[in-house]
Image: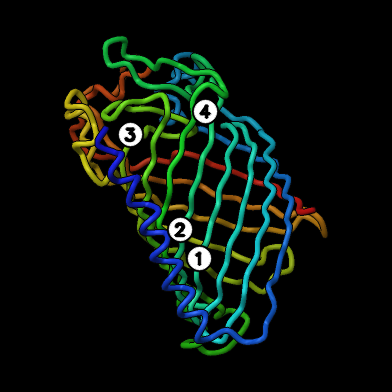
Amino acid sequence: MEAAPKIRLFPKIILSVLFCASLIFAETAASDSLVFEKEHKLSIVGIILPHNSLKNSETLHSWPFFAFPAPAWLTNYKWQKPGKLATLKGSAAGEANFAGLGLKLDVSVELIHLLELGIQANGGTALNYGKTSTFMGVYDAEERNYRQDIIFTEYAYGFTYKSSLTLPLLVLLPKSNWTKIILKLSGEYAYSAYTGADDGEVWKAGNGNMVNGFRYKYGGTLIYMMPFKRVPMAMLAANVSGFKHAYDFDPIYKDYNPAFKTVSIVPMLSFKVNETWNGMLMAAISRDRRYEHDHYKANEELLQKQVGAEWDLRTIMCIFTRKF
């Protein structure tokens, strides 16, 4: 398989980044001790899927919208070692939600609290919801459907290189309760694979179509801290994402245009319910592929011919969270 050489590069890159981070840290570390933190988080996620997001559902494609609540649990163990100029960070997180189970391991170095570089390894599975919604399986081009797997039979895995730069615009603005604005720029380069898929095959293990290979995402988030006790923050995120190599796909998907760049805009509003529960309201608006035939049979999207792009509201989410 072509992906094997790419995977063998991963340990070397990890060691290089960690070695560089340790050199920086050795020069800047003070007498600060290692700080550990454990976090348990329960979330109730309310999701509304408009009609355009239901086109691939064999049972829901004619619905104007579909709404459902879903619980999620996250356990996260974090540590950090502060220094004068650099802080080393690490975390191990396990999550269970409506799309499956996942595990993430993360290590990063933060320079002067503004620039952060890190690597994340991840693995997980997903649930098979059958004809209503496919969250797991490999696409069969001949059958024009997914060869659906059940939970714990196949797994997704991968790693992500991450970077972020925080720009505190508030230092350039007149000081007041209404000028606390921060801009956070970010970039990701991720490799993903699925144990049940060969190179060139499209698969799902969670949300969205994937292929064994690299993806990228870059963009930024504008954070506006508001002077309200119940509504402390508003955010606006904008990102561009896509597959790095179109040749990672089998040639049969050429009309799908694997090189297409998806643009997403996500307004978010955080709110405080009480002393124990917090919330987040968000909407996902994105520029996605437009196909030659707007109405098509379930799960034929990957074999459609892309003829343009269209903007639409994809998802509305309201998340209630309690930390333990």
Residue that label 4 marks: 65
| Helix, strand or loop status at disc 1 | strand
Residue 138 versus residue 216 in the image, above or below: above
Marks 3 and 1, Cα distance to the nearest angstrom? 26 Å
| Proximity of marks 1 and 4: CB atoms separated by less than 8 Å | no
Marks 4 and 2, Cα distance to the nearest angstrom? 37 Å
| Proximity of marks 1 and 2: CB atoms separated by less than 8 Å | yes
Amino acid type indicated by mark 3: Val
Give the label, 3 or 1, closer to the camera.
1
Label whose residue precedes the other's in the sequence (3 or 4)? 4
Label whose residue precedes the other's in the sequence (1 or 2)? 1
Amino acid type indicated by mark 2: Ile
Amino acid type indicated by mark 4: Phe
Label whose residue precedes the other's in the sequence (1 or 4)? 4
Residue 249 versus residue 21 in the image, above or below: above
Marks 2 and 3, Cα distance to the nearest angstrom? 20 Å
Residue that label 2 marks: 119
Residue 65 position, x and y percent, is: 52, 28
Label whose residue precedes the other's in the sequence (2 or 3)? 2
